[in-house]
Image (cartoon, rainbow, N blue to C red):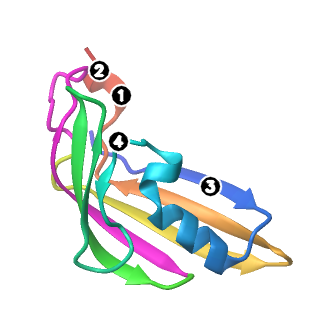
Amino acid sequence: MLQDYKCTVNARVSAEEAYRKVARVSDWWNKKSTGQAQEAGDTFRVDWGQTWVDFKVLEAVPNKRFVWYVEDCHLPWLKNQTEWKNTKVIWELVAANGTTEIQMTHVGLTDRKSVV
């Protein structure tokens, strides 16, 4: 059964700062990340050795939204080691009252029953 994984956090930063921070993947996700995630068409890889994910930025609307497409991946702890392939990660930024709500939705992420 497919479901979309969702997570929301509120940060005491402007939407502009939140946008810049989401785009700097190596600062918050993995220092070994390569490539760029700032503009539509950019590609990047998040790499932990045997585990890696290749993304392409489909949409980049400054201070509002990113859409990342998973072009390929290797997730060795899952039965389906390419489970994330052909899924999208959508980042929505909503600024209000001096904070920015950051909504992340991983569209097409399967439920955790597939974990080995």
Q: Mark 2: few, some, or many residues within 10 Å (few <14, many ≥20)?
A: few
Q: Mark 4: few, some, or many residues within 10 Å (few <14, many ≥20)?
A: few
**Which residue position is annotated with label 3?**
8
Residue 44 among those drawn in magenta:
no
Q: Which residue type does callout 2 highlight?
A: Val
Mark with earlier residue (4, 3): 3
The image's mark for residue 115 is: 2
Q: Quadrant of the C terminus?
A: top left
User: Where is residue 52 shown, x and y percent of the image?
Assistant: 23, 38
Range drawn in magenta: 64-83
Q: Which residue type does callout 1 highlight?
A: Arg
**Which residue position is annotated with label 4?**
32
User: Where is residue 86 shown, x and y percent of the image?
Assistant: 16, 55
Q: Mark 3: few, some, or many residues within 10 Å (few <14, many ≥20)?
A: few
Mark with earlier residue (1, 3): 3
Nearer to us of marks 4 and 2 is 4
Residue 101 location, quadrant: bottom right
The structure residue drawn at horizontal position 42% and vertical position 73%, both measured from the top left corner, is 66
Q: Which residue type does callout 3 highlight?
A: Thr
Residue 58 location, quadrant: bottom left
The image's mark for residue 112 is: 1
Residue 75 among those drawn in magenta:
yes
Q: Would you place residue 73 above or below residue 65 in this image?
A: above
Instruction: Confirm or deny contact between disc 1 and disc 2 (CB under 8 A).
Output: yes
User: Where is residue 70 shown, x and y percent of the image?
Assistant: 22, 55
Mark with earlier residue (4, 1): 4
Residue 82 left/right relative to 30: left
The structure residue drawn at horizontal position 71% and vertical position 78%, both measured from the top left corner, is 95
Tell me the CA gap for discs 1 and 2: 6 Å
Q: Would you place residue 18 above or below residue 49 in this image?
A: below
